[in-house]
Amino acid sequence: MRRSVTPVVRSRIMQSVTTIHSHVRYLPGPRRQLVDTVSMPLLETSLEAETDVQVASSMVALVTELGRDVLDETEGEGEGPLGMFDKLRLLLIKMAKSSKRTLDRQSTSAPTTPATRRVGTLAPLSRYGNSGSPAAQRGASSSPAALDIADPPELSSVAVMGLMSIFHVCLEHSTPAASENAVIVFRDLLHLFAPGYLSPPDVTPEPAAVPLRTRLLILQWLVRLRADASHRINWMSDVDITGPAKLLGRLASTNGDSSPPDAGAPLSPAASEDGHGEARGRSSRQVSMTLPADSAGRSRSASRLRRQLNEERSPSRTNSLRRAAAAPPVAATPVLWTVPEKLPFDFGSATSAIGGKALSSFDHNRMRDWTEEEDPGTGQMKVVEAEETLPPSEWLVVLPVSEYLRAVNHILQVEQEWELVSYILCHLPEQLSNKHFACGPRCAQQIHVLRKALCDGLRAGDRGDRIFPRTLPVGIKRAEIHAVAFHCLTALIAYRSLFSKQQQDDIVSTFMLGLGNPRDTAKPCIHALTIAAFELRPSVTKHLAETVRQLQKIISTAPLGVHILEFIAGVGQEPSLYANFTDADFQTVFGIALKYIQAHNERLADNPNDVEEGIEYAFSQYVLLLAYYNIAVWYLALRLSERPKFVAFLTRRLVQANEGKTEVDEATEVCLDMIARYAYSNADPRPRASSFDNLIATPTQAPVPPPKTWLVGNATITVRKLHAPAWVEVTVRRASGVVRMLWELQNISMTSSAPESDLIAALLRHRETAGLMHGIPSVIRDALAMLPNPAPPLHVGTRARSASFSGTSASQVPLAQRIEENAVVDAANAAARDVRQVTIESGVLTADPSFFTVQLSSFPHVDARMRPLLVPNDPASQRAVTMLDTIPIVDFHKVGVLYAGQGQTNELDILANTHGSKAYTEFVSGLGTLVRTKGSRDLNIYIGGLDQETDIDGKWTYCWDDDISQMVFHVATLMPTNRETDPQCTLKKRHIGNDFIKVIWNDSGGEFAFDTLPGDFNFVNIVIQPHTPAGNPWIGPGMSNNTEFFKVSMQLRPGMPEVGPLGTFKMVTGSSLPHVVRQLALHSNIFAQIFLASVGFETGRPAGTSGMTHRIEYSSNWRKRLQQIKLLKKRIAEAQQAASPSAENGSSPAQPIDLDQAEAARLFTAWA
């Protein structure tokens, strides 16, 4: 077609040729004649020279159809059609390269003026639609610069999209020849995207043959390639990169215009490097937009104020400020992509065929026994393939994914074009999470290169090097680029099996360096270290002490403080991580928590009228609670012999945090109570009744005095006389727990010794049989062996603190043990009947409960301030004591667990599931201990409202507990399903629907929507899914499954701020998954309760806004118990004052806390 012909006429000619071709497609003779005489000559003479986008698009569409015909004839036509295929793809490559004009990347490296930006801005990729005439689009601006900048990329992009279309046509055919052709097209696109990527690193890179916009277009297609569980190549269009794109300022404006904005004005070197320039508004920054002068001033003032109030400058930040004058130059570049993206192409869910000769990412039959070695000469990894076990005809066609990764490494390390680098950094974590895509020895080599490049680049600041990229873009801080790069390094944790111990240490140490910048990189590094604590445990254990010291240096706002304290709390639950800690390291951990407590109190003291509201108040309360929670977790993590060493340190620092107040606050009081409670014992915070209690409490005819209760400090002591002579039960109720003891008065004479020895033997045998005497010395067993008719030795069970639930499990009591217990009961009953304990002075032994309390006092020298208060024996006071027993000792948490099967997307199908996959079953079994619901009330086990009598909610559930918390999991698949009597699964939803946190195992193959299970109490969804979508179910012999790693993400209620270490998502192994999810659920449920108390259900606002607030302070069960004790104490004191007219009518004015006096009384001395 001659160029003198108008574009409209040329377009109609192409439409006619295409229509004729469609009519003769299934007529081999006429179609071949049409191709040989019309179609191919027309394309060979006109395609490369065509300048109109619409006409070129019609020609490319014809090329695609011709390529489809070639593939249809491949199986039986010999070499002819293959030659035609090569001609077609070469035509598209020439078209892409010929459209390159004088505009190149080098011409835009210098800062542009505002006028140039208005005229020379590249058109967005969304212009490739059919709306609007290309001529009219060109006529919108008569400037030659606009023509040179806007038109050429469109033509080359049309050619590139033609190559992509041909690739997907090959993918659909899934024949050996089609797959081979797909590999050829794939390599063509790689050469257009990254010319010279196959060259050695020291060779000067080739200049790009296509414009930057076209290269970005190719990258947009490449990053969306995936593989299913059978390694079959597919393509996905929707990829969420909102998180990293926000860090780089690539979110589109909220006014509905998603077109990429113009590049902003160049910043000064200092502003660009440290982020204090005019365009650096942190909270509401637009992409590369210039702020007005007054707005810029406010931005700078706010930035300075935040730094002064919330951050402590690290040495690296201070040095960077000193080097501001020597910062690298900045480059103004056009912004070519933003989020959300509007792709100019959509290939749907193009997937290769099931089985057969489909295009794959890895051939297990061919490379099953591959190994990798390090070349001693070059230091590079090399692949050692196993001997071929199958003939080449049986090989699968493998897409060279390793070459794509090599091109990515080339862009990151050599070329460093910012528009490409930024897009790679944002998309690479998502693509690498598809482990079946980047699979095989050659991909492993490139992953090694990528790890080294990321670690070296992120540590380059300490050596003065400047990479990622060397030339800093306009309006971007280097620390922001590093923050996104840390996300890429975090994704490589999933490839830990490829790395040596030294390389894993290198990854962890790189994350530690990122902690030095609390404003930009500390948060992603804390998240990464949280996951590395489970996946790279030896390396984290090695560096944990130094990591804690780095965290101690960070003075941050509450949002970052949340992540620091969550990390420390999670590490405190894993004893193997802090096995090498010294006393100084433990003090450092305590110091971090104490710092946040002190900062919270100082802020309230300095600004008593500064009222926090909404989310700010919720975050403040959550940080404070986490700080106290960390003290409890790490205090209990100490060895019992080491705890007394830290009592004075913790007490003084806690009291100092309250300095200036008239009294210690309740949170500190319960913390001190916990310290005293566990200083010398690992006893469980909840007493459990035993059979021996019933033996000595058997009713007799002798009168028994009523129990008496005293208030001693912030504890109640109840002494109850038992029916057995000389025995009393002592119950100490504190805020942090309850201790119940049995005491015997041994000041007795004229007593038969034989029955008493039988009673002692019964007691010891029962205790050992019940497994309640953890760590009993063997001397007890020896004593039992000396008794007549000794029982056979029984195993004494032990349980690590906070390791598992201590209630009844599914195991049955052995027959021998039941016989032993019955024998013990009979012997004890006989002994109790025979005992007649008589004294010389007064006959039958009697002792009032007051007798025992006097023995523990310094009577008559008792300080009036510390004198115990006797609780009156009236009904109101006794009810107050009983009310204390109704308040739980530990905090309760309930979490729903659901399984979404293949294709399940609605609430009813998910709730109706009665079982899940094998991986799901293994995960649920690791969440806690299987507990029988019926009878759990007698064992004081919290099961979150499940029926405990008739099994209407199922026979079993999973529970987990430690000395601070108890968590029950409402597992939907363990609950009965009856679609006839309960078609809507109401019985399940009444429990799971009221859980704030829900864990969803998503095997549906798609994304799980937050509102799939609608309800007012939906706050957080923790979604677990295989790292690779199942796709087709065919898995060949030797192929791996998805049980190694899983993608874990968190969905939040609208308006809730981010908590937890997941960010967008994290990759977690199946073995670590129950521990990670349990910690996430625990922390999320705590915050959800605080959020509900502080903000309520008014959560429709954007995250970060305050709005209305209830401003109800969240109280733990420890604090509620303390409040009940204080209320009882106040009532008794008021009653005594009213009954004593001669008492003082007034009280001395409140005085500030005396630190020395408070420390002296730290153990809540009762009588002294």
Image (tube, rainbow, N blue to C red):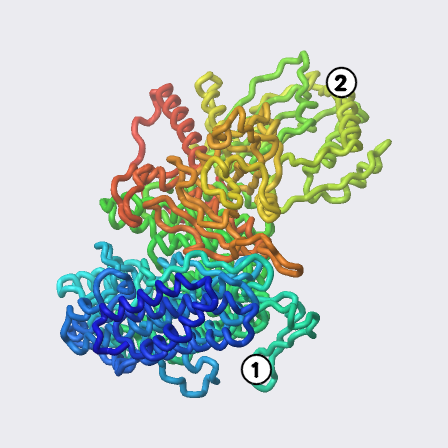
Spot the residue most to the top: 701
Spot the residue most to the right: 789
In this view, the residue in front, 807 or 884, is 807
Instruction: Specify whether residue 325 is in view.
Output: no
Question: What residue is rendered at 44% in x and 18% in y?
Answer: 876
Of badges 1 and 2, the one in the foreground is 1
**Res 556 → quadrant:** bottom left
Residue under pointer 1: 379
- Total marks shown come to 2
In this view, the residue in front, 796 or 809, is 809
Residue under pointer 2: 833
Residue type at mark 1? Gly
Compared across the picture, whether 51 is left or right of 386 comes to left
Disc 1 secondary structure class: loop
> Which mark, by number, is residue 554?
none
Q: Position of residue 289 (x, y in %)?
A: 21, 65
Residue type at mark 2? Arg
Instruction: Specify whether residue 275 is in view.
Output: yes
